[in-house]
Structure formats: C-alpha cells, structure tokens
Amino acid sequence: MPGTRYDGFTMVRTVQIEVTEETLAAVRRDPEEYAAELRLAGAAKLYELGKVSQEVAAEIAGLGRTEFLEALARFEVSPFQDTRQSLKDELATGD
C-alpha cells in the first residue's frame, strides 16, 4: 500500500498535505521545517483537547516527551491537562 511502511512491528503511514510556494514564503520556512512545525502544532492541539496523551503527542510531533513538554509553552498550552471534574474526584478520594 503506498504511503505505508513497517517500522519493526508498527505500521507507519505517510500523510501528505499540499502548500503553495507563497505559503512557505509567508511563513519563512522550507518544506521540512514547515512540516515539523505543523506536526508540533497538531500534536499540541490534540493534547490540549485531551484527544491524546503526552506520550502520543510527543510521538506525533517527532520529539521526546521532555522536548514536547518544553515546546508546549510556544503554543501557550499547559502541560497539565486535568479537568475540574478529575481534580474534584481526586480531592474527594484522596488520590
């Protein structure tokens, strides 16, 4: 299947997006830098929305977990994603 490879025991898919030269010029990035920035931005947003864990978000971003947590500051995303309800539950149970 095109865009699919196996990395050990894991299937890895390639996702492509198209951008114009004008877009790359506007963001002042080469295609590789822009792709890395989009991966990080997407991973940060998915983490912020609670769709993925820190570990999965870091993997999406292509970073180690510590690097990902440090990068969250650029997007003004808190590394702490507990909800009010989960905090209330923890306080109530003493966990």
Image: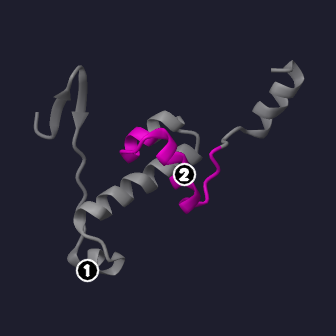
Q: Residue furthest front?
A: 66
Task: Tell me the quadrant of the picture where the C terminus can be found.
Answer: top right
**Residue at 36% of width from left, 45% of height from top?**
62
Foreground: disc 2 or disc 1: 2
Q: Which residue is painted at 22% across and 52% down in the image? A: 16
Residue 35 as seen in the image, left or right of residue 14: right
Give residue 35's position: percent from left, percent from top: 30, 58
Q: Residue at x 70, y 38 (%)?
A: 82
- The question of residue 74 being in magenta is answered with yes
**How many residues crowd around disc 2 within 10 Å: few (fewer than 14), some, or many (20 or more)?**
few
- Residue 2 screen position, x and y as percent: 10, 39
Q: Amino acid at mark 2?
A: Glu
Look at mark 2 in the image and give the residue it sits on.
70
Instruction: Say if residue 52 shows up in the picture.
Output: no
- Residue at 62% in and 45% down: 79
Q: Is residue 60 left or right of residue 91?
A: left
Outermost residue to the right: 92
Q: Position of residue 63 (x, y in %)?
A: 40, 45
Q: If you read the primary sequence from the N terminus, does the residue marked by circle 2 or circle 1 appear first? A: 1
Neighbour tally class for label 1: few under 14, some 14-19, many 20 plus, Cα within 10 Å: few
**Which residues lie in the magenta part?**
58-79
Residue 82, magenta (yes or no) = no
Helix, strand or loop for disc 1:
helix
Q: Amino acid at mark 1?
A: Glu
Alpha-carbon distance for marks 2 and 1? 30 Å
Q: Which type of secondary structure does the marked residue at label 2 adopt? A: helix
Q: Using the image, tell me which numbered label, if any, was put on residue 22.
A: 1
| 42 with respect to 78 (left or right) | left
Quadrant of the rendering where the N terminus is positioned = top left
